[in-house]
């Protein structure tokens, strides 16, 4: 392996230790829930989930969204981390 590539790999490892350098603008993920797989999306402002709780209740969130907000917290804006006025798509 050449020295330039070694330098890039080392830089990538340093970046990986600083997740705050990344901010998600859009996201689509498949979340394996306890009963089914669900599609969770984030469009830069609003979260959405295909689960029954999100689609049928007016709470505006669900366990799948909250889990992703926790997992991705260092890479989300404050608004995206704590969004409470969420709209189903």
Image: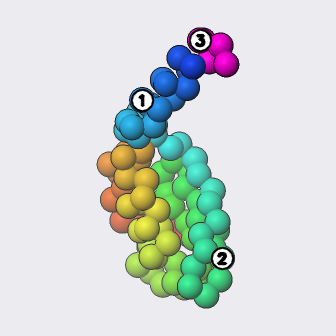
Query: What is the chief secondary structure element of the magenta stretch?
Result: helix
Q: Position of residue 31 (x, y in %)?
A: 59, 69
Residue that badge 3 annotates = 3
Q: Position of residue 3 (x, y in %)?
A: 59, 12
Q: Position of residue 61 (x, y in %)?
A: 44, 73
Could you tell me which secondary element the residue under label 3 belongs to?
helix
What's the image's color scheme?
rainbow
Q: Is residue 18 left or right of residue 26?
A: left
Q: Is residue 14 left or right of residue 89?
A: left
- Upstream in the sequence, badge 1 or badge 3? 3
Q: Is residue 64 above or below residue 13?
A: below
Q: Residue at x 67, y 19 (%)?
A: 1
The disc placed on residue 26 is none
Q: Is residue 13 above or below residue 31?
A: above
For disc 1, the neighbor class at 10 Å (few under 14, some 14 to 19, many from 20) is few
Residue that badge 2 annotates = 37
- State the image quarter where residue 21 is shown: top left
Q: Is residue 39 above or below residue 10?
A: below
Q: Nearer the viewer, mark 1 or mark 3?
A: 3
Q: Is residue 3 magenta?
A: yes
Residue that badge 1 annotates = 14
In this picture, which residue range is highlighted in magenta? 1-5
Q: CA distance from mark 1 to mark 3?
A: 17 Å
């Amino acid at each position: 392996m050449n020295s330039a590539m070694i330098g890039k790999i080392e830089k990538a490892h340093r970046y990986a230790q600083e997740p705050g350098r990344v901010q998600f603008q859009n996201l689509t993920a498949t979340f394996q829930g306890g009963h089914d797989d669900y599609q969770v999306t984030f469009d830069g402002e609003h979260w959405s989930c295909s689960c029954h709780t999100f689609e049928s209740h007016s709470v505006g969130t669900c366990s799948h969204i909250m889990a992703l907000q926790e997992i991705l917290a260092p890479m989300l804006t404050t608004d995206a981390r704590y969004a409470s006025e969420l709209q189903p798509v």
